[in-house]
Amino acid sequence: MNIEQIRSLFPVTKNAVYLNSASQSPLNTLVYDRLQAHVRTELNPVGKKGFDRNHIRVLLSKLLGGSSEEYALVTSTGVGMGIIAQGLDLKKGDNIVLPECEHWNNTFPWLQLEQKGVEIRFAKINKDNSIDPEAIEELIDHKTRVVAIAAVRFNSGFRPNLSAIGKMAHQKGAIFVVDAAQGAGMIPIDVEKDEIDVMAGCGFKWLLGMHGTGFLYVSKRVVKMINPVLPGMYAAEKSYYDLSFHNDSRKFETGTIAYSLFDAWSAGLELLLDIGIKNIYEKVLENSDFLIDGLRKKGYQLVTPTRKQEERTAIVHFNAGSFDTTKALYEKLREQKVLVTLQAENIRVSPSFFTSEKEINVFLNLI
């Protein structure tokens, strides 16, 4: 599949310059068509078959590693992280280590545990918004129960060294938890090679789904250490009088989910597998190279760390020196149908694998 064939799957490319996939991937025709097909079956459900939840689990395992039994279907990253935070048997004196200024889905669930006397330790980030694994390691001790981090930082685009941090956590007996919302589908992730114990993510960003779709990966190594907190009909064996949870990640699932959305999402996951995450990552780095070079030439202040290519992603943050000027620039771009995000005091640009060099040039010429 060449770039023009890929671009034809995303109708937004005909109407705007879409540089906003870190906020939400635009709907592609494959997902849209699958959604319409599902809805049509609801008009005439004669002969309708039950939804195959395991199909999504298999696709996720092919993209992100592990086995299908290690994936639960949830509705968002926040739900997945909350299930884990509440399901761990943490007590006063235990501690959790994470970098400062993480996304709220990777802070609020842990901060709530302070009510139990759990200590939350924040590792300092560098002035260039990068994170040294050593800053995390020095906070880990024999009372650390969880080390948590985002696979890609939403507020800088920085990509930490997951495998190095996972090793550090495991050396002290801690569980390694990853928020994959901004990484899954855009960067290569292998839960086993990266030593990830738990990972939660959403479908509506780089995984080409819609709001209301998500996943929770819990490795076989730690699944027995985490208790279900919202058990529904899919979490256990069917019985009126006994509660016998499944012995894999299905035990974290609740009741009925939006099957229409999950069915449609499967088409997006299949597209990612068809193109290949390695190819996608190479393309987005090519885009960000071009983007960063253009921003530097125009004298803008880069917020995204750029020293090491392996720490870079499709997400680039910059500003114009003052918030008023940056906001005015954002409004100008929006008026010209160049879609980006005003994120805190910066503009966040996030071209995807379907973005052309010509589109990035349109953006650069406007600024």
Image (spheres, rainbow, N blue to C red):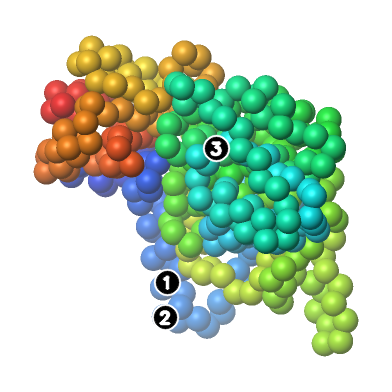
State how far apart marks 3 and 1 are (Cα).
Answer: 43 Å
State how far apart marks 2 and 3 are (Cα).
Answer: 49 Å
Q: Amino acid at mark 3?
A: Glu
In the image, 148 versus 13, the foreground residue is 148
Q: Amino acid at mark 1?
A: Val
Nearest-to-viewer mark from 2 and 3: 3
Residue under the point 22% across and 27% down: 320
Give the residue at mark 2.
43
Pointer 2 local density, CA inside 10 Å: few below 14, some 14–19, many at least 20: few
Q: Amino acid at mark 2?
A: Leu
Give the residue at mark 1.
39
Q: Which mark is residue 100?
A: 3
Task: Check disc 3 and report its element: helix, strand or loop.
Answer: loop
Q: Is residue 238 visible?
A: yes
Left/right placement of residue 354 relative to residue 74 reads left
Q: Position of residue 355 (x, y in %)?
A: 31, 31
Q: Which mark is residue 103?
A: none
